[in-house]
């Protein structure tokens, strides 16, 4: 299973943030068929990397905060307008993702909002507390916006993605033994509902995962990723990856 980092930034561009100039907003692709997160403007890096959007069968979204989700509308429009997609697309995420997606398409007055004009079907799957289907297991975590974690197993390799929930017992249980723990990091110091690098290191050790990849991290470390990785390594002995945009790893 391969994981390509298309955009690795998170949050919003604010004072002192260098993220958006340098790195695209959060979006990744698993093999060629699962698009994982679609932060604002994700289409820029999706196209810059030459991702075949017609090969994407599913879009997996952790939660509806804009840095994870709002880029979806442009992706859907590109699939219609540029790719002439005809195959159905599944969109998987928290409760409300169907209404939010349809609402955004129509508020932006894009023809992709029209089921007839679009030319391909949208199939929404809104996740419950925990789900098992195909090669995916999910669990609902704890975040101000309903957030879900995904465990994906292919060819006996396991990728676990935690998109911003704190590490509840349920999230840790689902992460157990994963070959790669992919996780957003939001703050530097422990916080009531955001993950710090040291929290991630501790969770990785608790869950017994083999490797860690951190995305969506504070921009203070833009030019100093090694030091950022060290904060995770304080509590975790395995390999820690702090990837840049347009890099691919084998899980
Ligand atoms: Zn975020
Ligand atoms: Zn969030």
Image (spheres, rainbow, N blue to C red):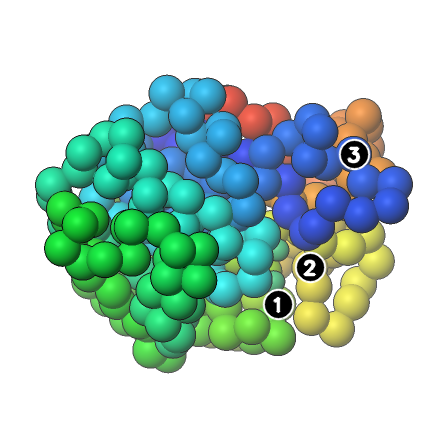
Is 186 in front, or is 110? 110
Q: What element carries label 1?
A: loop
Marking on residue 18: 3
Instruction: Give the CA distance from mark 1 to mark 3.
Output: 25 Å
Q: Name the residue under label 1.
A: 166
**Crowd around label 2: few <14 · some 14–19 · many ≥20 (10 Å):** many
Q: Is residue 2 left or right of residue 180?
A: left
Q: Does the beta carbon at disc 2 come under 8 Å from ligand 1?
A: no
C-beta proximity under 8 Å, tags 2 and 1: yes
Question: Residue 132's x, y, as percent?
Answer: 24, 66
Which secondary structure lies at badge 2? Answer: loop
The quadrant of the rendering that contains the N terminus is top left
Q: What element carries label 3?
A: loop
Q: Residues within 10 Å of mark 3 (few under 14, many from 20)?
A: some
Q: Residue at x 87, y 45 (%)?
A: 15
Residue 223: give x, y in percent of width and height.
81, 26
Residue at the spot of label 2: 195
Whether residue 224 sits left or right of residue 154 in the image: it is: right
């Amino acid at each position: 299973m391969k994981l390509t980092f298309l955009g690795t930034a998170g949050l919003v561009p604010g004072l002192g943030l260098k993220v958006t100039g340098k790195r695209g907003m959060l979006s990744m692709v698993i093999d060629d068929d699962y698009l994982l997160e679609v932060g604002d403007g994700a289409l820029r890096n999706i196209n810059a990397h030459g991702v075949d959007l017609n090969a994407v069968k599913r879009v997996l979204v952790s939660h509806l905060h804009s840095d994870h989700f709002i880029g979806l509308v442009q992706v859907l429009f590109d699939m219609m307008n540029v790719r002439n997609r005809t195959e159905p697309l599944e969109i998987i995420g928290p409760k409300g993702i169907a209404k939010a997606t349809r609402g955004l398409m129509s508020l932006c007055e894009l023809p992709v909002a029209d089921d007839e004009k679009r030319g391909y079907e949208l199939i929404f799957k809104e996740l419950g507390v925990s789900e098992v289907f195909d090669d995916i297991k999910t669990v609902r975590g704890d975040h101000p916006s309903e957030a879900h974690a995904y465990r994906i197993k292919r060819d006996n390799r396991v990728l676990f993605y935690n998109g911003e929930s704190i590490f509840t017992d349920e999230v840790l249980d689902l992460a157990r033994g994963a070959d790669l723990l992919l996780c957003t990091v939001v703050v530097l110091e422990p916080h009531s509902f955001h993950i710090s690098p040291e929290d991630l290191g501790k969770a990785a050790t608790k869950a017994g995962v083999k490797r860690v990849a951190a995305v969506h991290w504070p921009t203070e470390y833009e030019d100093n990723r090694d030091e950022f990785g060290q904060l995770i390594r304080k509590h975790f002995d395995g390999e820690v990856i702090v990837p840049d945009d347009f890099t691919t790893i084998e899980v």
